[in-house]
Amino acid sequence: MKAAQKAAADAQASADKANAALASENQAVTDNDAAVNTLQTTVGDLKANQVSLTTTLSDETTAIKKSIDSPVALHYKGITITPGGYLTGDTVYRTKATGGGMPTAWSSLLYESADAYSLSEFFGGANASRLSILLEGKGG
C-alpha cells in the first residue's frame, strides 16, 4: 500500500510539475501573442508613415520642379526679384480725325467745311500699362 501511495504521490508531483510547466507555457504563449500584436501594430503604423512620407516627398518634389520650371521670382546673389504689373493694348478708331490721343475731345470735332473733315484716324497705345518690380533681400 505504501508503494501505491508513493506512486500516487509521485504521480501527483509529476502532474503538479506538468501543470506548472503548462501554466508557464501558456504564459509564454500569451506574452508571444501580445508581442506579435504589438509588432503588427507597429508595422501597420510604419506602413502608414511610409505612405505619408512618400506622398509628402512627392508633393514637395512636384513643387520644387514647378518652381524651377516656371519661377514666380528670380534669385540672384541673395536678392529675390519679383516682376509684376500689367500691360494694356488700347486702340481707338475715329471716322473723323481729331488729332488727339486716346480720349476723344468732343470740342475738337471738325465741321464739314474743314479740310481734314473726311480723314479718319487710328490710334494705339499702352498708356494704362503699369510695370513693377519687387526686390527683396536680407538686411545686413
Image: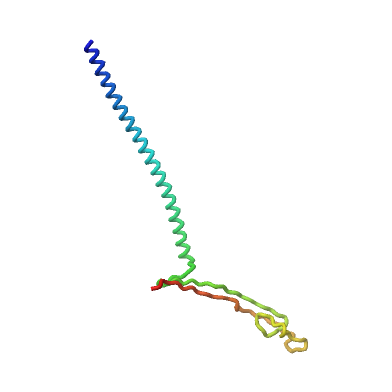
Q: Quadrant of residue 25?
A: top left
Q: Position of residue 45 (x, y in %)?
A: 41, 45
Q: Quadrant of residue 14?
A: top left
Q: Position of residue 63 (x, y in %)?
A: 47, 60
- 1 with respect to 139 (left or right): left
Q: Position of residue 50 (x, y in %)?
A: 41, 50
Above or below — where is 70 with respect to 51? below
- 124 with respect to 73 (left or right): right
Residue ranking furthest to the top? 1
Q: Residue at x 60, y 79 (%)?
A: 127
Above or below — where is 22 with respect to 77? above
Above or below — where is 13 with respect to 28? above
Residue toward you, 96 or 128 = 128
Location of the C terminus by quadrant is bottom left
Residue toward you, 38 or 120 = 38
Above or below — where is 20 with respect to 1? below
The colour scheme used to paint the residues is rainbow
Q: Position of residue 46 (x, y in %)?
A: 40, 47
